Image: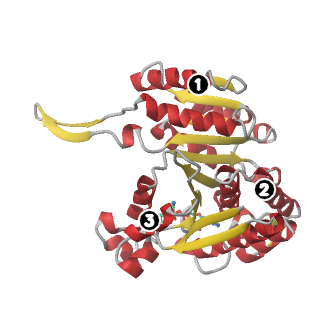
Amino acid sequence: MKLKIACISGDGIGPEIIAEAKKVLQIVCEKYDHSLIFEDLLLGGASIDAYGEPLTAETIEKAKNMDCVLMGSIGGDTTTSPWYQLPAHLRPEAGLLSIRKELQLFANLRPALLYEELKDACPLRADISQQGFDMLIMRELTGGLYFGARKTYEKNGLRVATDTLTYDEEEIRRIAIKAFEIAKKRKYKVCSVDKANVLDSSRLWRQVVMEVHKDYQDVSLEHMLVDNCAMQLVKNPSQFDVVLTENMFGDILSDEASMITGSIGMLPSASLNQSKFGLYEPSHGSAPDIAGKNIANPIATILSAAMMLRLTFDLDQEANQIEQAIKDVLKEKYRTIDIMSEGCNLVSCDQMGTLIASKLK
Ligand code: NAD
């Protein structure tokens, strides 16, 4: 198979972690006889330095001509970097928001997996963390409260602010389909999260999810209110597999889910559109405090590459092998500094990438 990948290294630790993801992809593609084509593109601070803007029209066009985008992370130190003296629309993050919009990436997927070897990093009570968890939060990314009409005005001498939360049935249907499809690659289990006891938008959400579910009877479906879900995530996270929810609830719940894994350098993410196109990136930022030191953890980016193989290219076996290689390296007690604990072997960013790649040969 030919894999055409737009590659955005980005800023800070971005180039270091992307180099390791590329290293792992090269090995796995050689093994399975796939040809890899990378188109390196600039976004964020690197694009500001080169072109004076965080995202150019040419970059968007080039990205659209590839099968998907693999990204490191963008942005700099928000207090010292000159990028943050620029007007908001010219700052690094504006480029990220624009590319998501241009590529119509409406489904955001964030897995939260507690690795056996990293259970000590979990901030939950030991009897809860011992049960482990492996869930995927699927958040609607282009609708709802963050995109609705808003205004601030004065009424009867008081300042008033209004935001609107709107979903049409098509926006709900397309992400529900994604959730059920992805559940079929996992444990055939979806929990749809809403606030249907209060909100009209949530009642429509629930109705449409139930309608879509008729075509996926082999997948079990549960509905949960968002306040209960926030509690269940810390009380009994092992009950969840795919958690499907709207934009704002997903924003909060996905951060909660990632916190309970206890290690930011381990969390991948994917943002998908209607087709198989996706943008794959670690959940963490560009970590300017450790950039250029070869100490960043590349695992979140390597896991994002594995998600890319599975979701854009349907290469499940190759993705499984990368995930297994990571587990093996952790089992052998190799750690980057962010996940280091007593009795383990400290390795650099590139050593971690090489160790993972060596398991794939
Ligand atoms: P951050 O995630 O970059 O860093 C938070 C802390 O975690 C830092 O101490 C950092 O050293 C550490 N860390 C993060 N990733 C790590 C890794 N792979 N290995 C080891 N340690 C790691 O968050 P921040 O400091 O709030 O933001 C820094 C910059 O990143 C900002 O400009 C922000 O806007 C940007 N950012 C970008 C994205 C993105 O590209 N999608 C996401 C979040 C933040």
Q: Quadrant of ligand 1?
A: bottom right
Q: Looking at the image, is 220 positioned above or below residue 159?
A: above
Evaluate whether residue 90 shows in this view: yes
Q: Earlier in the sequence, mark 3 or mark 2?
A: 3
- Find numbered disc 1 in the image and state the secondary structure of the residue it sits on: strand
Sequence-earlier tag: 2 or 1: 1
Write down the residue under mark 1: 224
Badge 3 amino acid: Glu
Q: In 3D space, how far apart are the residues under numbered discs 3 and 1 (Cα atoms)?
A: 40 Å
| Number of other residues with Cα within 10 Å of mark 2, as a class: few under 14, some 14 to 19, many 20 or more | some
**Residue type marked 2:** Glu
Q: Earlier in the sequence, mark 3 or mark 1?
A: 3
Question: For the C terminus, which image quadrant?
Answer: bottom right
Distance between the Cα atoms at labels 3 and 2?
Answer: 32 Å
Asked if labels 1 and 3 touch by Cβ distance under 8 angstroms, the answer is no
Checking the image for residue 61, the label placed there is: 3
Mark 2–mark 1 Cα distance, whole angstroms, equals: 30 Å
Q: Which residue is mark 2?
A: 323
The residue shown at (48%, 73%) is: 42
Please name which of the two marks, 3 or 2, marks the residue nearer to the observer: 3
Q: Nearer the viewer, mark 3 or mark 1?
A: 3
Closer to viewer: mark 2 or mark 1: 2
The amino acid type, in three-letter code, at marker 1 is: Met
Residue 312 sits above or below residue 218 on the image: below
Image coords of residue 219 (percent x, y): 70, 27
* 265 or 23: nearer the viewer: 23
| Rendering coords of residue 8 (x, y %) | 54, 69
| Quadrant in the rendering for residue 338 | bottom right
Outermost residue on the left side: it is: 156
Classify mark 1: residues with Cα within 10 Å, few (<14), some (14-19) or many (20+).
Answer: some
Q: Quadrant of residue 188?
A: top right
